[in-house]
Amino acid sequence: MATTENFIKYACEQIEGVGNIRYRKMFGEYMVYINEKPILIVCNDTVYVKKLEIIEEYMKNSGVGYPYKGAKEHYILDIDNEELSKKVVQLLESVTELPKKKNK
């Protein structure tokens, strides 16, 4: 089951105020960018974040899963918890680098 347009819009609304938010459809699912940095993966109406030490304390009671076949294990972010979601996104944005431009 692919992520619905309504869910991706809801997920973005939950983190409003953390920076410039945009999303992009990729392989039938979505990547959410904050200030042009890839922060959230949204697959099957589930929000995933990378397992990084900076958010370990906030995510210790969260589930884990694989957003797509072949992916590393990610935390599952409770997007309904607006306060937690914003804090996790802000922390991840602070340590995530801008993607490098690919030369054609």
Image (cartoon, grey):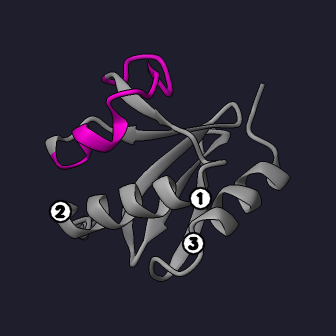
What crowding class fits label 3: few (fewer than 14 Cα within 10 Å), some (14-19), or many (20 or more)?
A: some
What crowding class fits label 2: few (fewer than 14 Cα within 10 Å), some (14-19), or many (20 or more)?
A: few
Q: Residue at x 44, y 28 (%)?
A: 62
Horizontal and vertical percent position of residue 33: 46, 66
Q: Nearer the viewer, mark 3 or mark 1?
A: 1
Q: Residue at x 46, y 77 (%)?
A: 18
Q: Which mark is residue 68?
A: none
Mark 3 / mark 2, whichever is N-terminal: 3
Residue named by callout 3: 22
Q: CA distance from mark 3 to mark 2?
A: 18 Å
Do the residues bearing badges 3 and 2 touch, measured as CB atoms within 8 Å?
no
State which region is magenta: 54-72
Q: Residue at x 37, y 55 (%)?
A: 88
Q: Is residue 86 above or below residue 70?
A: below
Horizontal and vertical percent position of residue 82: 59, 58
Q: Quadrant of the C terminus?
A: bottom left
Q: Is residue 51 above or below residue 1?
A: below
On screen, residue 20 versus residue 46, left or right, reads left
Secondary structure beneath label 2? helix
Q: CA distance from mark 2 to mark 1?
A: 20 Å
Q: In front here: 30 or 77? A: 77
Q: Nearer the viewer, mark 3 or mark 2?
A: 2
Residue 68 drawn in magenta: yes
